[in-house]
Image (cartoon, rainbow, N blue to C red):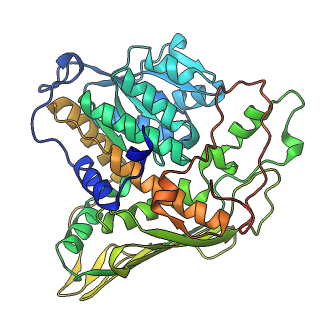
Amino acid sequence: MTNQELVTTRRNFLKKSAAAGAVFSAPAILSGNLFAGENKETLRVGLIGCGGRGAGAANQALSADANVVLTAMGDAFPEPIQEKLKNLREKHPEKVKVAAEKCFAGLDAYQKVIESGVDVVLLASPPGFRPVHLKAAVQAGKHIFCEKPVATDAPGVRSVLETAKLAKGKNLSLVTGFCWRYEGARREFYKKIHDGAIGEIRSVHASYYAGQVKPMAPPSERSKDMGDLEWQIRNWYNFVWLSGDGLVEQAVHSVDKIAWVMKDASPIKAVAVGGRCTPNHQGNIFDHMFVTFEFANDVRAFIGQRQINNSHSDVFDCIMGTEGTAKITSAAGPVIRGKETWRYRGPKTDMYQQEHDELFASIRSGKPINDGEWMAHSTMLAIMGRMAAYTGQEVTWEEALNSKEKLVPDNLDWKMKLDIPPMAVPGFTKLT
């Protein structure tokens, strides 16, 4: 990708993102044309990343289609494979057909799952691995469920954008784990806002206040023969290159809703504050941030993120317009008070299941879904906020998207020396 191609204008990114979010209306010829139309051919699914979210995705995939089977599983470590395999067999005894030789552990497990004869892959490893795993799956012609976020640095986002384009060319379905965009109440809520229910958008305020997700293990728990890479992967949430930090890995859902209300327009710039209050042993992520994004026409979006135990927890979204307000709180569904008062009254949607229902329906119909560009855009928005918090600087969209800061190491090896970078210090950490 040339430098000129990287300098993406806000208008172009908006246009691309809008196109990426739509389901193609014309029939497409899928790989081998096996699955378009009738539900006759069995779809074989492979799971890459056997943590809790990966097991959840596998359960939902097996529930989404009557003629689907799980045939391969892969993870960096063997223990979670066997644990999740046992649980999935209890839930879907007729659909889990994973032979012993199709359980792959190691750094190359993702390649072995992809090469095992599957048709659909579920990508649920730590986010730092996502760009490489996604690229390999698309190159191999697989349909994909890709968990959020899709990268932990700007080079990774740029890789995902290229891969998403390749997936379009191959007529592959690529559905993202940004699950709120698949939830019925939120879909109707944001559609009404886009249709003018509260007038022109003036500001968006979101919060993601919660407890710790995966506390860092104390150094005393590290055995003498455990290498640097294994130690960091086993504690992946606490390292920036693997998780992206709390804003990128967890609060990215709220960042994605900011992007949604803004119709995936890119911000002009961002400033942020953040740091760490609680001990984290050897980890290097912040435990709180507050980011202000500036969009065109003096529109501001604010996101507060905190993951500290014994603190107030709340996840909400508040959108201010020229003719009213719209809110989503933890305790209540979406509400609009504008030209009219509106509250969602429709059926409840299991957004996690809906993602997979629509993924498999798109494969069967031959009308692929490609969420690639907007899922990359929302991830980049969160990374931009982290950059602003870590450096203490005002960061423009172009600076963030074109950043050369590559966090994910190349040529990973269990025996490699992998030093832990110090935690960022605003005012001293440089923007690269």
Q: Quadrant of residue 143?
A: top left
Q: Is residue 140 left or right of residue 419?
A: left
Residue at the (10%, 32%) spot, across then down: 27
**Residue occupying the point 24% across, 20% down:** 31
Q: Position of residue 345 (x, y in %)?
A: 21, 71
Taking 138 as reference, is 174 above or below it? Answer: below
Image spot of residue 129 (x, y percent): 56, 36
What residue do we see at 32% from left, 55% from top?
A: 13
Spot occupied by residue 103 in the image (x, y as percentages of width and height): 54, 18
Quarter of the picture containing the N terminus is top left
Q: Is residue 211 visible?
A: no
384 to 236, vertically: above or below: below
Closest to the observer, 4 or 245 = 4
Q: Is residue 22 above or below residue 162?
A: below
Q: How many marks?
A: 0
Q: Residue furthest left?
A: 26
In the image, is 425 to the left or to the right of 296?
right
Which corner quadrant of the image does residue 342 belong to?
bottom left
The answer, for residue 20, to whether it is visible in the render is yes
- Residue 416 in percent (x, y) is at 77, 27
Which quadrant of the structure image shows residue 186? bottom left
